[in-house]
Image (cartoon, helix red, strand yellow):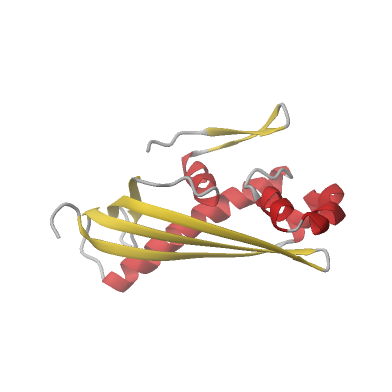
């Protein structure tokens, strides 16, 4: 897939724009990343590693307790290395996990800053527990601001591109 900037709407009014990393975060939140390529910076300045995304699955759970929202998002992503600089495999996995979690966190921050919910959390809560949704829907912006978020990523690196 190819990413560019995205517009976020609140009703019929454009409320915010997302740059490319934030657009990737939005696609991760909505479980819309299936295949593509991503380049991740490494600890050595100027060095990057390129991956081909083989598949990706994001599971988001929302739970409301005492008018406090708890959101857990877990990304499960399988990658192939396309191009890389010499790097330790554990550091590679850690940096890759942080990269995807940070993309989701950046997008979440835009939602909080703008006071709009475009991540699909409200729809998820409404589907899972309509009664609790009715209790908080009028104060949703405040609930979203004060929520606790647990963002996680499981990375599976299969190998190097077409040669395995």
Judged left or right of residue 35, residue 144 is right
Q: Nearer the viewer, residue 19 or 122?
A: 122
- Name the residue located 29 percent from the left edge and 53 percent from the top edge: 48
Q: Quadrant of the N terminus?
A: top left
- Name the residue located 67 percent from the left edge and 52 percent from the top edge: 124
Percent x, y of residue 3: 43, 37
- Identify whether 107 is placed above or below 131: above
- Name the residue located 25 percent from the left edge and 62 percent from the top edge: 158
- Name the residue located 45 percent from the left edge and 62 percent from the top edge: 98
Direction top: furthest residue: 12
Percent x, y of residue 107: 58, 48
Residue 131: quarter of image: bottom right
Q: Nearer the viewer, residue 161 or 97?
A: 161
Residue 42: quarter of image: bottom left
Percent x, y of residue 19: 51, 38
- Identify whether 11 is placed above or below 100: above
Q: Quadrant of the C terminus?
A: bottom left
Percent x, y of residue 45: 32, 56
Q: How many marks?
A: 0
- Identify whether 91 is placed above or below 129: below
Q: Nearer the viewer, residue 28 or 48?
A: 28
Judged left or right of residue 111, residue 35 is left
């Amino acid at each position: 897939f190819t990413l560019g900037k995205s517009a976020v709407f609140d009703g019929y009014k454009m409320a915010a724009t997302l740059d490319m990393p934030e657009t990737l975060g939005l696609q991760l939140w909505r479980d819309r990343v299936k295949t593509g390529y991503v380049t991740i910076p490494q600890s050595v300045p100027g060095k990057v590693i390129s991956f081909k995304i083989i598949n990706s699955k994001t599971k988001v759970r929302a739970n409301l307790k005492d008018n406090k929202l708890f959101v857990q998002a877990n990304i499960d992503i399988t990658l192939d290395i396309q191009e890389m600089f010499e790097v330790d495999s554990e550091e590679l996995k850690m940096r890759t996990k942080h990269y995807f979690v940070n993309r989701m966190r950046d997008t979440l921050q835009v939602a909080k800053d703008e006071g709009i919910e475009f991540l699909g959390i409200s729809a998820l809560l409404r589907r899972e527990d309509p009664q609790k949704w009715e209790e908080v829907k009028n104060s949703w912006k405040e609930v979203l601001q004060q929520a606790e978020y647990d963002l996680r990523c499981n990375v599976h690196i299969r190998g190097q591109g077409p040669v395995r």
